[in-house]
Image (cartoon, grey):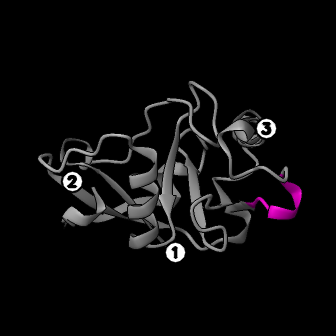
């Protein structure tokens, strides 16, 4: 399976995670957030960054994850709080993601996108034992910011 991630060019040479807290993880949990498509990855980045600097060069990372069912855990919307798309639900969502991360039950957590809930993001644990063998950076592409997005 291919997934997509947009990063500043300086961070495009290899797959890394900062360990910063986000919607589905707590601090010091090293998770790479990816989208199911280039367009979803674009929308996710736009809504998560208050200040996108078009002056920076960005790259689209194309990431391959082995298509093995055991590597994936899915979070179903029916199991989420009613307000899961809001910032106020972060602590509950972070707990879900943190439980997954700590358990190492799978390499990838499939979660609904808060931007387009019928599409999915894929969180990849860089600390999972299968990470180095089952995940690879296939290639990078130049990324063009359409000025109408910023």
User: Gap in Å between the C-alphas at discs 1 and 3?
Assistant: 28 Å
- In terms of secondary structure, where does tag 3 sit? helix
Residue 58 is labelled as: 2
Q: What stretch is highlighted in magenta?
A: 74-80
Which of these two is toward me, 95 or 1?
A: 95
State the SS at label 2: strand
Q: Is residue 74 left or right of residue 117?
A: right
Instruction: Give the Cα separation between the discs numbered 3 and 2.
Output: 32 Å
Q: Which of marks 3 and 2 is nearer the N terminus?
A: 2
- Check if residue 54 falls in the magenta segment: no
Residue 88 percent location from the top left of the image: 71, 37
- N-terminal-most mark, 2 or 1: 1
* Mark positioned earlier in the residue sequence (1 or 3): 1
Q: Distance between the residues labelled 2 and 1?
A: 23 Å
| Residue depicted at 38% across the width and 40% down the height | 50
Q: Does the residue at mark 2 contact the one at mark 1 (Cβ under 8 Å)?
A: no
Spot the residue most to the left.
55
Q: Mark 3 points at which residue?
A: 92
Q: Can residue 90 be seen in this view?
A: yes
């Amino acid at each position: 399976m291919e997934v997509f991630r947009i990063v500043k060019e300086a961070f495009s040479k290899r797959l890394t995670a900062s360990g910063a807290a986000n919607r589905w993880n707590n601090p010091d949990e090293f998770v790479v957030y990816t989208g199911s498509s280039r367009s979803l990855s674009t929308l996710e980045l736009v809504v998560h960054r208050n200040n996108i600097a078009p002056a920076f060069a960005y790259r689209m990372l194309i990431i391959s994850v082995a298509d093995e069912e055991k590597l994936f855990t899915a979070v179903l919307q029916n199991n989420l709080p009613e307000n899961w798309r809001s910032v106020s639900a972060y602590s509950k969502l972070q707990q879900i993601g943190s439980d997954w991360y700590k358990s190492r039950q799978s390499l990838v957590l499939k979660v609904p996108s808060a931007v387009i809930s019928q599409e999915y993001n894929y969180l990849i644990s860089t600390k999972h034992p299968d990470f180095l063998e089952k995940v690879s950076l296939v290639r990078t592409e130049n990324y063009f910011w359409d000025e109408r997005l910023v």
